[in-house]
Amino acid sequence: MTTASTNRRFVRFLVLALVAVATACSGSSSSPTANLGDECQLKDAYKIAQVGATYIRCEIVAGTSIHSTDPNLTAKFVWIDTTEAQFVLANANNETLRIDGSSTVYPLTAVAAKYFETASKSVMGSKAARVTVGISGTGGGFEKFCKGETDISDASRAIKSSEAANCASAGIIYTEVIIANDGIAVVVNPKNTWATCLTMAEMKMIWEPTSTITKWSQVRAGFPDTAIKLYGAGTDSGTFDAFTEFVNGKGGVVRKEGVQTSEDDNVTVRGVTSDTGAMGYFGLSYAIENSGSVKAIQLDNGSGCTEPTEATVQAYTYPLARPLYIYVKDTSIATKPAVGAFVQFYVDNLRQISADALFVPLTDTQITTLQSEMAKIAALPRVSK
Amino acid sequence: MNSTLSTLTDLQPSGRKRRQQNFEKFVVAFLAIIAASGVLITTGIVVSLVKPTVQFFSEVNISEFLGSVQWYPLYNPPDFGVWPLVIATFVIMFIAVAIAVPGGLAIAFFLSQYASDRTRRILKPLLEILAGIPTVVFGFFALYFISPNIAAKVWPIGDVGIYSGLAAGITVGLMILPMMTTLAEDAMAAVPRSLIEGAYALGATKREVCTKVIFQAGLSGIIAAGVIAMSRAIGETTIVLLAAGSSAVFTFDPGQPMQTMASFIGFAGLGDQSTDSTGYRTIFAVGSLLFVITFALNVISRKIVKRFREVYE
Amino acid sequence: MSTALARSSRFEADLHDSTSTWRKSRDRIFLGVLWFATLLAVMTLFVLVLTSFLDGKSRLNMDLIRNFPSPFPQDAGIQSAIFGSLWVVVTSGVVSLFLALGSAIYLEEFANSKSKIHRLISLNIQTLAGVPSIVFGILGLAFVVRGPLSWGFSVGSASAVLTMMVLPVMIVAAREALRAVPSSLRDGAYALGATKWQTISKQVLSAATPGIATGSILGVSRALGESAPLILLGALAYVSSNPTGFDSDYTVLPLAIFKYATEAQLGFRAVGAAAIIVLLVLLVALNMIAILIRDRSRKSW
């Protein structure tokens, strides 16, 4: 192969690649589906498909064709803002909302962000608000939040007093919002037929710092002599903190020997599936996603064996249930209308968002609390533009 | 040569020549400043590490840090003995270097003495692509391929699980291999052709030229390359984080999960704990230790390199 | 004449003995070892690419490049990650090449190799080559994102930190390249009346270009593959637009790959694997540019 022909081939490849990239970038985004309802007041041939506190979603009536150059009119559905929200969304001019924090809460917030951006784009077009989400961890997220670098902080635990003091001294006032419930599922290998329900006392026996348990037979009489292999979440994660607090009474208190910790919950899944006597724990969404290869056990803290389900986690009857939080910066709500709009949108569509992200949604009581928090947010002064 | 130059400058330089000389003085100064940027970066690293490290040692006894063999900083009650991390770092480094240095030398010999032009033209780009593969990809490669197929099957001691220092070490070695090859090749290229051709003329085989001539003559460059490979192995974060787990147990057995200093920093830095806690400040303490070790390693290696450097021409 | 040759009496004996079969078998064993090592490297690359391709081929379509990150596996794309990576890598590649060349030229051509400054700088560079990437993340967070520069979580900060990370390797490679230029070339130029800088800029640099090109390939490849420090520097997991300037939010391909591989939903595994393939294609493209430069400028003595 001569250098000249190599060069020609390379140039041809480069041109093709550039053309490919150019055509790829001119694509459009997709939109979710909705159901039928009343006729939409603001636009002909549309029916109301969803009503939220700050918007109405109108869907084009099946069989209707619209001839118009206005993209909002020819879209399959349109988000129409109402009254108070009209002010908010209409002023969300090309703003960027910055969110960072826990990687546990990330899937939920990312779904909310995706839907919100779609909504904002159909109302505002090119001036749509944008959302960015990072995964620096709950602690790292709080650090950035208290420095004013982010608008919203995702957290898998409540803010610590030292972190709250940091925020206070930096003049950052925030609103704490419980956004979802999470259960920590304890899983065993599917071939494990004996441990279908463990008491919290037995869990403590296995996982406490002074534990020397190496075989299932030491846990309960009648259990076979299989060796126990323990897999845990990374010691720097909120899941680890929550699990150790629930089982042993204090965060970070757990046996040091005999546990394989992992950053990647998918690896914990692998570990549990590879060993008959293995036991591991991680967030409920991983258990749901891998329900074919691992088995979640029931836990009994005195009121009977409870399976980790949406209902038991919501009611907090499952012993290892915990809330997930977002923290919203009050000053952002005042100066960046998109922030208030986003939080409102998040809350309004929480059921859909939680279902899509495989999270357990809030109970009605929790939503009532949420509404009062939302009212507080809505009452904050706005800066008009 | 010097006398010729001084004769030249003795003559009155023309205006153009003078401007050229002034320009060159400026260039030298400019370049010196650029070169000093390396020192600036190091200073920056030291400064950003010092304050939290000092704070850490006011909270944790340095005798525990250097004396204890239990490392459980995020447990309750915490243990801050750093030795499990240090041992793990060196174990994984040895495995990686054992693969990368001989391997890199071998491939470099192959490329410089044995391979045909066509082979070289195919092989070099392949190696460069291997060098460019992100550490994340190598990490998952270690976890999903090396660990079950190689580490678990090869290691005789004990029960090798999903995470092992061995899987991480092998993968780090494979990752550094192309870099070692390139640097070794550069060192070999610096050996003057006259030496090599002289050896061939004397009837040496290719092997003998490689092992007796090139290796000896290029030794200083090869050692320098090896030291860079060692430093890179010590500092590798992502692969070890993904493949060796996060259990910092005091052991010399690479079949067990291990946590090195670098992977601990990565692990703790990206976690959920508060940035204002002693647990978080362990990052800086371990980071300082890592920096000191790397520095010491480099100082020692420079002395060795100086001993072996042979100057030609 | 080097003492290296004289050191081995076995070697001398071998030279006189052209019929020994033991000598020939050593030759063959040696060659076998070399082939083994080479095959090891090639097989590693092959397995990596193959497993990624098999896992990701279901998602290798235009949608992958066209779409932005999405919490839904079937929708997820990596457009913002591709452009983010390009912005960050090209910037840090260019800047670090400039800085590396400057430093290498100074150290090799101008500075007295025995001086304290020279030794200090050299030692610094060598140490920096081994500093774990995450420490650069901490450094960047303290001095570039916040602190004196305060560039925030932007493409500019990422480029600055990656430049610092990549610089040591590039400097080492550039120095080796400059050292490999025979001094006969320089001496000839001086004899013809050229000044030092003229010699360097017109003769030495062009002669050292192949080695420098190799060094920049190594550096750029490393920059393309980093993820952990960038998380600290604000590389996002979810961002739905491409960077428009050095102050833009961004994400990079390795981070996207990491995120997709650790998600609960199994559908993301294929997206991550497909993203690996895209990253490799990008890598090959960047390498080919550098190889072109290297081949064009390669001279033999």
Image (spheres, grey):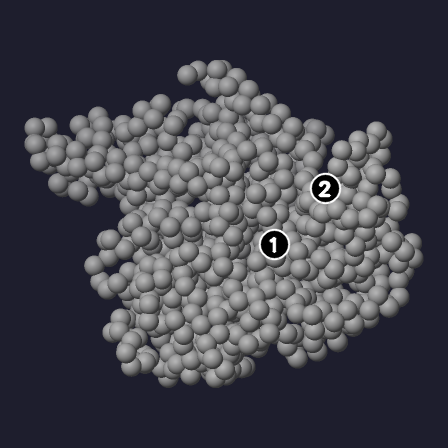
Image height of B159 relative to B133, above or below: below
Quadrant placement of the N terminus of chain C: top left
Q: Where is mark 1, residue-wise?
A: A356
- Residue A312, visible in the rendered structure: yes
Q: Residues within 10 Å of mark 1 (few under 14, many from 20)?
A: some
Q: Residue B72's spot in the image, x, y percent?
A: 44, 75
Tell me which chain the residue with mark 1 is part of: A
Residue type highlighted by circle 2: Thr
Q: Nearer the viewer, residue A275 or A250?
A: A275
Distance between the Cα atoms at labels 2 and 1?
31 Å
Is circle 2 on the same chain as circle 1? no
Q: Given contact means CB atoms under 8 Å apart, are the residues at marks 2 and 1 in contact?
A: no
Among the 4 quarters of the image, the one containing residue C137: bottom right
For the residue labelled by badge 1, is the local secondary structure a helix, a strand or a loop?
helix
Image height of C60 relative to A262, above or below: above
For the residue labelled by badge 2, is the local secondary structure a helix, a strand or a loop?
loop
Q: Where is mark 2, residue-wise?
A: C244
Q: Residue C237's spot in the image, x, y percent?
A: 61, 52
Question: Horizontally, is C69 left or right of C109 in the view?
Answer: right
Q: Residue B301's spot in the image, x, y percent?
A: 37, 56
Tell me which chain the residue with mark 2 is part of: C
Q: Residue at x 68, y 45 (%)?
A: A32
- Tell me the mark number nearer the camera, choosing from 2 and 1: 1
Question: Horizontally, is B169 left or right of C219 in the view?
Answer: left
- Residue C277, visible in the rendered structure: no
